[in-house]
Amino acid sequence: QVQLVESGGGLVQPGGSLRLSCATSGLTFSGYTAWFRQAPGKWREFAAGLGWNTGTTYYTDSVKGRFTISRDNAKNTLYLEMNSLKPEDTAVYYCAAGSRWYNGPYDYWGQGTQVTVSS
């Protein structure tokens, strides 16, 4: 059974940083993994993607230079390092796995973790 469990969300002031983690189990890693986010009243959107075997990364324009997606193969864990956070980064963040393409569609999803950027 495949499981993805996110952690690391919370409340942070503008300009602050957070690191999200996505612990996985039951996956045979191939293709892409990614972080998506969904802000209140908006559609879920792609934030960052990672080719698990290639290490190639992709970012939506609004997070380039501020967010970094990475992985720890030994721990089967995906990370999203978020710096210089802005109020518009406020969203529920989801990790996803199991896609042939970096922007989806993805077969597996976590339950999400809330990130709130506010003073």
Image: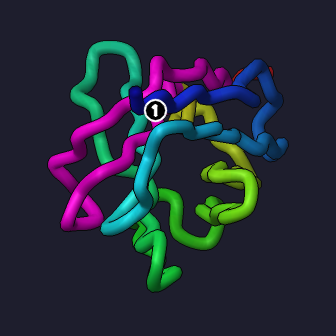
Instruction: Identify the element where label 1 is drawn.
Output: strand
* Residue at 76% over, 37% down: 14
x, y (%) of residue 46? 33, 49
* Residue at 50% over, 22% down: 112
Residue 36 position (above or below residue 73): above
Q: Is residue 79 visible?
A: no
Number of numbered tags placed on the structure image: 1
What residue is shown with label 1? 94
What segment carries the magenta color? 91-117
Tell me, yes or no, whether the highlighted magenta stretch contains residue 20. no
The part of the image, by quadrant, that contains residue 58 is: bottom left
Between residues 11 and 97, which one lies in front from this camera angle?
A: 97
Tell me, yes or no, whether the highlighted magenta stretch contains residue 113. yes
- The quadrant in which the N terminus is found is top left
x, y (%) of residue 60? 38, 62
Seen in the image, is 44 located left or right of residue 82?
Answer: left
What amino acid is at disc 1? Tyr
Tell me how the rendering is colored: rainbow
* Residue at 64% over, 38% down: 23
